[in-house]
Image (tube, rainbow, N blue to C red):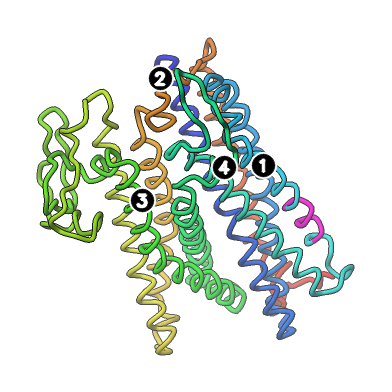
C-alpha cells in the first residue's frame, strides 16, 4: 500500500467508524427523552427505568464519539495539511460552531445523568432534550462542511488564490440543506431499526418483556416514520446532485450516454473500459423524469467527461444500488409495522415480525455507509469539487502505512469495548432498570 492510498484509506476507515458512533449519539437522546416524557406524564416506573438504561447508552456513545471525532481532527491536520491550509479559513466556521454544540451537549448530559431528584422534573427532562438538539446541531454543522466540499461557495478562486472569503455563504452552501436533511433522517432510520431490533431480540428470548416491549415500540415507531420520509429527502438530494454534480449522478447510475428518455438502471455491472453497463434492468425515461420532471429532457452521460475527471464508476454505482435497495426494504418493513399499528392487528407482537426487525439491525448502518461512499467516492477526483484534486490535497507522513494499521486497531478496539459495555447494560436490565423483575433493586 503506497502512502497516498494509505492516507485515503485511513481517513475512510476513521469516518466509517465515526459516522456510526455519531449517528447513535444524535438519535438516542431523543429516544431517552421520549421515554422520560412518558414517565413524567404517566408515573409508570417502567419508563423511568428505560430512560435510565438508555441514558447510560447515550453516555457511552458520547464518550466514544468524542474520542473518534478528536482522532479525525488530528487526521485532517496531519494527512491533509494542503487542503486545510486553503479550505480551513473558508469553512472553519461550522467546525468552530460544532465545538460549541459539543460543549453544550456535554454540559446538558452531565445535568441529565446526575440530575435525578436534584432538579425540577421538567427542567431535568429539558436537559435531555438539549442533549439531543445539540447532538443534531453538531451533525448538521459537520455535514455543512462536507456539503461545502461538494458545492464550494463563499470565496472567489482567482489564479490559485482564495479571495473574498465569506464564511456564512460557505456554511450555507447550495448542498447543505439536502445533505443535512438526508443525513438526519438516515441517522434516525439506522439507529431506530438497530435499537428496535436489539429489543426485538430480547422479546424473542422472553426476557423482561414489558421493558423491552416499551423500548421496542418507541424505537420502531421513530424508525418507521423516518424510513417513510427518507425517500422524499432522497429525491431532493438526487435532484440537487443532478444540478450541481452531474458527473456524480452519472456514476451513481452507471449512465454513459447523454440522451433524452434516460433510463433508470437497476443492478448491472459497469464496464468502464467499454463505457457500458451489463446485465442491468433499465426503466426507460425514469432517470430523466426523476432528474428533470420531464422524460424527454436529456441526462448527461459519462462519455462527455474526460476519463481523468470521472469518479470510480463501479464503486459509486454499487454503493448507490445498495443504499437504495436497503432503504426500500426498510421502508417496506415500516409500511407493514405502521399498518399493523394503525389497524391494531394482533400480529404486531408475532415472532415473525420481531424476527424481521432483528434481521434489520445492520441494514440501516450498511445503507448509511453506502450513502457516504456515494457522497465521497462520487466526488472524486476532487476533494473540493472542481477546485482542488484529492491528489494535490494530501501530504502523507513518512510511514503512514503503520499509522493506518495503528488507527484501525484503535477503532476496532473501541468498537469491541462499546459492544461489551452495551452487552453488560442489557444483561443488567432486570436488576437495575425493570421494576417488574423479581431481581430489581430500587434505585433513586
Classify residue 383 by image quadrant. Answer: top left
Label 1 to label 2, Cα distance in Å?
29 Å
Q: Residues within 10 Å of mark 3 (few under 14, many from 20)?
A: some
- Left or right: 259 in relation to 100: left
Mark earlier in primary sequence (1, 4): 1
- Place of residue 182 in the rendered image (x, y in percent of width and height, measured from the top left): 44, 55
Label 2 to label 4, Cα distance in Å?
31 Å
SS at circle 4: helix
- Place of residue 169 in the rendered image (x, y in percent of width and height, measured from the top left): 54, 43
Mark earlier in primary sequence (3, 2): 3
Asked if the residue under mark 2 is in contact with the one under mark 3, i.e. CB atoms within 8 Å, the reply is: no
**25 above or below 7?**
below
- Label ID, residue 415: 4
SS at circle 1: helix
Residue 109 colored magenta? yes
Give the magenta-colored segment's residue range: 105-111
Q: Residues within 10 Å of mark 2 (few under 14, many from 20)?
A: some
Magenta stretch: dominant SS?
helix
Residue 283 colored magenta? no
Q: Residues within 10 Å of mark 4 (few under 14, many from 20)?
A: some
Q: Which residue is mark 2?
A: 391
Q: Residues within 10 Å of mark 1 (few under 14, many from 20)?
A: some
Which residue is depicted at the point 52% across and 17% down? 402
The C terminus: image quadrant: bottom right
Label 1 to label 4, Cα distance in Å?
13 Å
15 or 202, nearer to the observer: 15
Which residue is depicted at the point 71% across and 71% down? 49
Mark earlier in primary sequence (4, 3): 3
Mark earlier in primary sequence (1, 2): 1
Q: Which residue is mark 1?
A: 66
Disc 1 or disc 3, which is closer to the eye? Answer: 3
Amino acid at each position: 500500500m503506497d502512502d497516498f492510498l494509505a492516507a485515503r484509506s485511513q481517513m475512510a476507515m476513521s469516518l466509517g467508524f465515526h459516522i456510526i458512533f455519531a449517528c447513535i449519539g444524535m438519535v438516542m437522546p431523543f429516544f431517552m427523552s421520549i421515554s422520560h416524557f412518558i414517565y413524567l406524564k404517566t408515573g409508570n416506573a417502567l419508563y423511568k427505568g428505560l430512560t435510565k438504561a438508555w441514558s447510560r447508552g447515550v453516555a457511552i456513545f458520547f464518550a466514544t464519539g468524542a474520542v473518534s471525532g478528536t482522532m479525525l481532527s488530528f487526521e485532517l491536520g496531519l494527512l491533509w495539511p494542503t487542503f486545510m491550509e486553503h479550505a480551513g479559513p473558508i469553512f472553519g466556521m461550522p467546525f468552530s460552531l460544532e465545538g460549541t454544540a459539543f460543549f453544550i451537549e456535554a454540559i446538558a448530559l452531565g445535568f441529565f445523568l446526575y440530575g435525578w431528584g436534584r432538579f425540577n422534573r421538567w427542567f431535568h427532562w429539558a436537559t435531555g432534550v438539549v442533549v439531543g438538539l445539540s447532538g443534531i446541531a453538531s451533525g448538521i454543522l459537520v455535514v455543512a462542511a462536507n456539503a461545502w466540499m461538494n458545492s464550494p461557495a463563499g470565496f472567489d478562486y482567482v489564479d490559485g488564490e482564495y479571495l473574498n472569503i465569506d464564511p456564512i455563504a460557505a456554511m450555507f452552501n447550495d448542498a447543505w440543506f439536502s445533505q443535512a436533511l438526508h443525513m438526519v433522517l438516515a441517522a434516525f432510520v439506522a439507529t431506530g431499526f438497530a435499537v428496535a431490533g436489539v429489543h426485538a431480540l430480547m422479546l424473542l428470548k422472553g426476557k423482561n418483556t414489558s421493558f423491552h416491549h416499551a423500548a421496542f415500540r418507541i424505537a420502531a415507531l421513530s424508525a418507521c416514520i423516518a424510513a417513510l420520509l427518507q425517500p422524499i429527502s432522497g429525491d431532493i438530494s438526487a435532484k440537487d446532485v443532478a444540478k450541481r454534480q452531474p458527473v456524480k449522478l452519472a456514476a451513481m447510475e452507471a449512465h454513459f450516454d447523454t440522451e433524452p428518455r434516460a433510463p433508470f438502471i437497476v443492478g448491472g455491472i459497469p464496464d468502464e473500459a467499454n463505457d457500458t453497463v451489463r446485465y442491468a434492468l433499465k426503466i426507460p425515461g425514469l432517470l430523466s423524469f426523476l432528474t428533470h420532471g420531464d422524460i424527454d429532457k436529456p441526462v448527461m452521460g459519462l462519455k462527455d467527461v474526460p476519463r481523468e475527471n470521472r469518479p470510480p464508476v463501479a464503486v459509486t454505482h454499487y454503493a448507490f444500488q445498495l443504499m437504495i435497495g436497503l432503504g426500500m426494504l426498510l421502508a417496506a418493513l415500516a409500511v407493514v409495522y405502521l399498518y399493523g399499528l394503525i389497524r391494531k392487528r394482533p400480529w404486531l407482537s408475532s415472532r415473525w415480525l420481531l424476527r424481521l426487525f432483528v434481521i434489520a439491525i445492520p441494514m440501516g448502518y450498511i445503507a448509511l455507509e453506502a450513502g457516504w461512499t456515494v457522497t465521497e467516492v462520487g466526488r472524486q477526483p476532487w476533494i473540493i469539487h472542481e477546485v482542488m484534486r484529492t491528489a494535490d490535497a494530501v501530504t502523507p507522513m513518512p510511514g503512514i502505512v503503520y499509522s493506518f494499521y495503528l488507527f484501525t486497531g484503535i477503532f476496532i478496539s473501541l468498537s469491541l469495548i462499546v459492544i461489551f459495555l452495551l452487552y453488560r447494560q442489557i444483561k443488567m436490565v432486570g436488576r437495575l432498570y425493570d421494576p417488574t423483575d423479581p431481581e430489581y433493586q430500587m434505585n433513586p
